[in-house]
Image: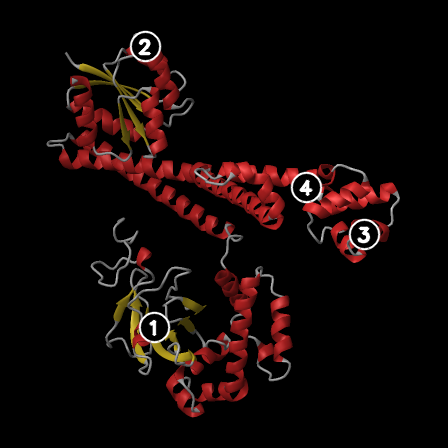
Amino acid sequence: MEKRVLLIEDEPNIIEAISFILSRDGWDVKTHSNGHDAMEAVRGRQPDLVILDVMLPGRSGFDILQDIRSDAEFASVPVLMLTARGQEKDREMAERSGASRYMTKPFSNAEVLDAVRSMVAS
Amino acid sequence: MPESSMIGTRIRERRVMNGIRQSDLARRVGISPSYLNLIEHNRRRIGGKTLIKLAEALEVEPATLSEGAEAALIAGLQEAAGAQQGSRAETDRTEEFAGRFPGWAQLLVGLQGRAADLERTVETLTDRLAHDPHLADSLHEVISSVTAIRSTSSILVETEKLEPEWQSRFHRNINEDSRRLAEGAEALVRYLEGAASSEAEIKSPQDELQAFLSAHGFHFPQLEQGRRAKDAIEALIADAPDLATDAARRLARDALEQYRADAAALPLAPFREALRRDPDPEALAQAFGCGLPLVFRRLAAMTQDDVGQVGLVICDPAGVLTFRRPFPGFDLPRDAGGCALWPLFQVLGQPQIPLRARLRQAGRGGDTVRALAACDQRAPATFERPALMRAHMLILPDAPGAADAPVRDVGVSCRICPIRDCPARREPSIVADGF
């Protein structure tokens, strides 16, 4: 069965590119592009993996991650955080909020694929 | 420290309150009235026996007189000791220190206050950079579009048998994103340029001098006449809004005195006339029987009407640029050292041999200029130290018809220089390695 991934990101062309490479890799990709109701999207999609951008309109990715972690049903779902800033502060914040992995933009497609494969396999 | 908290003021207040004359109090305590006067005006620090005797005569506890001042001082010292982690200050003897060395103690407390102020300034500046919303916005825009382009372009390159619909879709996306990238980068450049000018308050004395000289177009008619030059120099400095610090005013005074001496050696009228006959610096030096550096400096002190485009850099023996008249098409670094390939630095090693070269600055559209370099002595040698040399490089437009002559490729300063594999490189370039 195809693994479900939920991509929460607001840049349409990044959504398109990542959706494309993940679909070709055999994933069932769903996307969501704003922060307000991201948590509802997580509940509705029941993903095996979440890719979450830090800078989202409406709500920060860190806040959304906290919601995901405090919901018993999703407390252990792997979350890959994406951010435009590679600062140590953001990395620490991501780790504290419970991100499973952290990736800084710009990334290569191969990095994304490697990351999502290893996160679901483990 | 406020006046009212000082010992002398308290003594005076107490004495006036008790209705004692200054001379009477002085006599009772066994000091001269003039000394007491100095004490009362906080011009002399007292402690120990004199304080105790004064307190007795004024019928108060010695601590009442000293407490205000000392308490503040001691609190300040304790704060200073606490602020310096791992400090081995003898905190159990703070009072003794404040009592015995009030001046040093005051200085220390003052320095601690200054250090705290500076720390706050640094924090504010760091914060401004890290949390500046404009900078963050522009960067976010640039990084987002770069991310999309990178991902999309590698799909186009790496996916075998990509369907035509997808292909045209991704092409369109790349086109969109590259436009956004261009806009974002432009916004970023605008921001950084703006930031540089809004930092006007954080200028070095050299910058202030540069602004002052530029504002006058590097030409000072007031100093071209022999008389009252000293007054003219002081008046120029007093009227200069660009010279905000003492250090800058001193630099300006030196520069203007050099100008004055040069103008006396090569007066304006005959120099201008000779210039019209033949503007070649070497011909000018021969006509006036003087060295090239003087001619260079005089050329750089003329208005553009007289000499056209002329640039000049002067450096000291350590290679630090001390004078810069800019030349369009040949950048001079603002504060970092120049390019080690400039003839300017070459003549420092061969001060008796002037140099002439055609230079092309890398990464600037290939403008070629004519550079003439020569050295003179700023101070003659003594048995204790060598002569202090000063190198000059005059920058002139390329000579007509010189297009086939050899050209030396040089940079501005390493950080922004795109020349690869340069043996003169002293730090990595943000241009060569970044793109």
Residue in the picture at 52% in, 53% down: B200
Q: Chain of mark 4?
A: B
**Number of numbered tags placed on the structure image:** 4
Q: Chain of mark 1?
A: B
List the single residue furthest toward the left.
Answer: B160
> Which mark, residue B344?
1
The amino acid type found where label 4 is placed reads Ala
User: Percent position (x, y) of residue B205?
Assistant: 51, 61
Tell me, yes or no, if residue B237 can be seen here.
Answer: yes
Residue in the picture at 32% in, 34% down: A86
Q: Are marks 3 and 4 in contact (CB under 8 Å)?
A: no
Instruction: Please identify, in this view, whether the residue under mark 2 or under mark 4 is nearer the observer.
Output: 4
Residue that badge 4 annotates? B69
**Quadrant of the image occupied by residue B148:** top left
Q: What sort of colour scheme is used for the picture?
A: secondary structure
Q: Residues within 10 Å of mark 3 (few under 14, many from 20)?
A: some
Q: Residues within 10 Å of mark 4 (few under 14, many from 20)?
A: many
Q: Of label 1 and label 3, which has the lower sequence position?
A: 3
State which quarter of the image contains the N terminus of chain B. top right
Q: Of label 3 and label 4, which has the lower sequence position?
A: 3
